[in-house]
Amino acid sequence: MFKKKGLLLAGVLGFSFLTTACGDDSASGDAAEFQWDFVTEETQGQVQYEYAAEFAERMAEKSDGRVEITVYPFGGLGDEVDQVEQLQMGSTELAIVSPGFTGTMVQEAQLFALHFLFPDDIALTQEILNTSEALNVHLREKYEEHNMTPLAYFTEGAMQWTSNDVPLKTPADFEGFKMRIQQSPLISESYEAYGADPTAMSWGELYPSLEQGVVQGQENPIFFIEDAGFHEVQEYMTISNHNNYVAMTVVNTDFYESLPEDIRKMMDETVEEMRDVVFEMQETMNAELLEKIEEDTENPTEVITLTEEERQAFRELALPVRQFFRDNYGEDAGKILDLMEQEIEAAQQ
Ligand code: 6CS
């Protein structure tokens, strides 16, 4: 089988200085007053990268070329965890970060790993992410203790499972199942609650690991499953909507606080504008790429949609993990989750 995406990614990782300079004014020969790096966990054409590229373009335009942002695709500056370290140290100014990769640093942020926490309605989930005090005040403070400021949280779509050997329909199907996860103890706990055997790894290693049976399955939004080519090496995809894939637009705190007021205002404005832009982006990509998976006769993937009753069996096992989160990640984690639950309930009424 032609491993289109696996090869593409190997290429990206191999040539670690592949970058896109947006707002490049080299033609005029003038160096921009502000030159920043924006690192993402995805490659060109995927949500995070396209977000960063659009963000860079808008900042260049608004600032009349005073700001030049270089966007790095995944692999350009190391793996996901390396990227977080660079942001924290300030060698990178901006990043898109998945909370899963900060799980051992900002334990409270692991609440995003809780299955069936956010509403199934993605638009409502995005509204909660935009307005939540739990996230935009309290969780933000937790990140700021590590010199990182999340300016926005956005959904990349509902997460689905893909698998080999067994279609994932009931918790029993997860018994001993080798599941790839991001590096977060609570994601691990969530899959152990179903009886699975989770292994943390970067997505850069995932394609060959699925192909060779190192792991049997994984979770991701549909656009990512198709674009990374995971469906090429997976027999089944289960539409489980068990969680939402949330990513964050994060800046180095010292850098952000040292910006001149007019530039910081431009950045805040751009963050606001990007909320609707990225929502539409993920919606289109998830819908189009689902069709692509369904129509791919060369790499057939059986798509299974869970019924509400089937989802309920998973929900029942997932709920006690919230108590695990409260018991293990400190008092503030419990308070943030309590507030988050109240906010979700209020939004649903
Ligand atoms: O599964 C992952 O690790 C990757 N998934 C997405 C949707 N974005 C980047 C992330 O590293």
Image: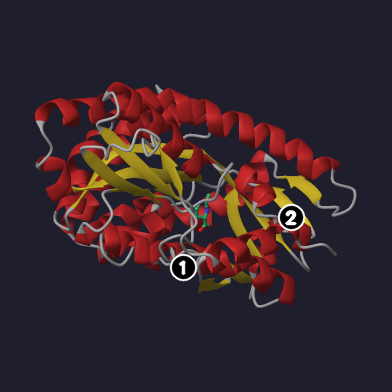
Q: Are marks 2 and 1 in contact (CB under 8 Å)?
A: no
Check disc 1 and report its element: helix, strand or loop.
Answer: helix
Q: Amino acid at mark 1?
A: Ser
Q: Amino acid at mark 2?
A: His
Seen as rendered, the residue at the extreme right is: 297
Check disc 2 and report its element: helix, strand or loop.
Answer: helix
Residue under label 1, please give it.
188
Check the image and tell me how it is coloured.
secondary structure
Callout 1: CB less than 8 Å from ligand 1 = no
Q: Closer to the camera, 320 or 220?
A: 220
Label annotation for residue 85: none
| Above-or-below relation of 129 to 159 | above
Q: Closer to the camera, 342 or 94?
A: 94
| Whole-percent x, y for residue 85 in the image | 28, 64
Picture residue at 27% right of the left edge, 34% below the top: 67
| Above-or-below relation of 175 to 33 | below
Q: Residues within 10 Å of mark 1 (few under 14, many from 20)?
A: many
Residue under label 2, please give it.
231
Callout 2: CB less than 8 Å from ligand 1 = no
| Above-or-below relation of 197 to 144 | below
| Quadrant location, the N terminus | bottom right
Q: Quadrant of residue 187?
A: bottom left
The numbered mark, 2 or 1, whose residue comes first in the sequence reads: 1
Residue 34 is at least partly visible in this image: yes
| Whole-percent x, y for residue 92 in the image | 28, 54
Q: Could you tell me how many numbered marks the image carries? A: 2
| Quadrant location, the C terminus | top left
Q: Residues within 10 Å of mark 2 (few under 14, many from 20)?
A: many
Picture residue at 11% right of the left edge, 41% below the top: 257
> Distance from label 2 to label 1 (Cα)?
23 Å
Q: Closer to the camera, 210 or 204?
A: 204
Q: Nearer the viewer, mark 2 or mark 1?
A: 2
